[in-house]
Image: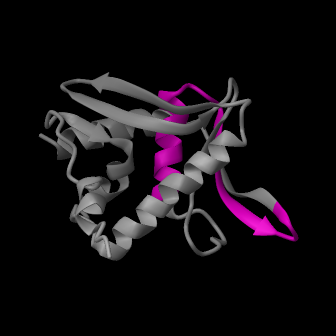
Amino acid sequence: MIDLTEELKKKFVPRDEPANVVHVSSVHALLNGWEDRPPDFQAMMRMYNGTWKHKMVQELLPQYKHEVKKEVPYKDIILSGTMDCLAEDHGLEIKTSENLISSAKEWYVTQAKLYCSMFEVPHIYIVQPVIRNSKLELKRLRKVGRNDDWYYKTLEKIYELTR
């Protein structure tokens, strides 16, 4: 038997980045005062499974740019995020939950709202890959529109919370 657990854990070591870098994926937790804890084994497995599901879906969407990273400076912080799929006029944020999701979770919406302004697109579709009737489809969980006023107010809140 080969135990892969330690190799899996290495994939979830905290990022070695300057303290002023704030990741879009952490913003909802920051705004709501949630504790940022390392994932347990089950969470690591779900996230690792999600990684290959993302790659599979992205491979089937050649008309999009994939894993597009952007860093936006604001005062003395940097907001950093990576869009799953980006087209000229919209983006896709892929959610790979093991269970079917009936609607987008609020932290998905926060992420998509930030990406709309960061990547300067009018909207982001939050989607989930679904296998149904011998088809692989992307189920739209929500369409999120760009709101630059909300974005700049949120940047200011992030700045205040990270000082």
Quarter of the image where one finds residue 131? bottom right
User: Which residue sits at x=78%, y=57%?
Assistant: 137
User: Magenta span has 110?
Assistant: yes
User: Quarter of the image containing the N terminus?
Assistant: bottom left
Quarter of the image where one finds residue 74? top left
Which residues make up the magenta segment?
A: 107-135
User: Which residue sits at x=38%, y=43%?
Assistant: 24
User: Quarter of the image containing the C terminus?
Assistant: top left
Q: Is residue 4 above or below residue 14?
A: below
User: Magenta span has 33?
Assistant: no
Q: Which of 82 and 134 is in front in this view?
A: 134
Please state the horizontal and vertical placement of residue 83, each as a whole percent of the image.
51, 37
Q: Is residue 125 visible?
A: no
Q: Is residue 51 left or right of residue 45?
A: right
Please state the horizontal and vertical placement of residue 108, each as a whole percent of the image.
51, 55
Q: Is residue 151 visible?
A: yes
Q: Nearer the viewer, residue 104 or 93?
A: 93
Please state the horizontal and vertical placement of residue 15, each as a whole percent of the image.
22, 44
User: Which residue sits at x=27%, y=29%?
Assistant: 78
Q: Is residue 60 left or right of residue 28?
A: right
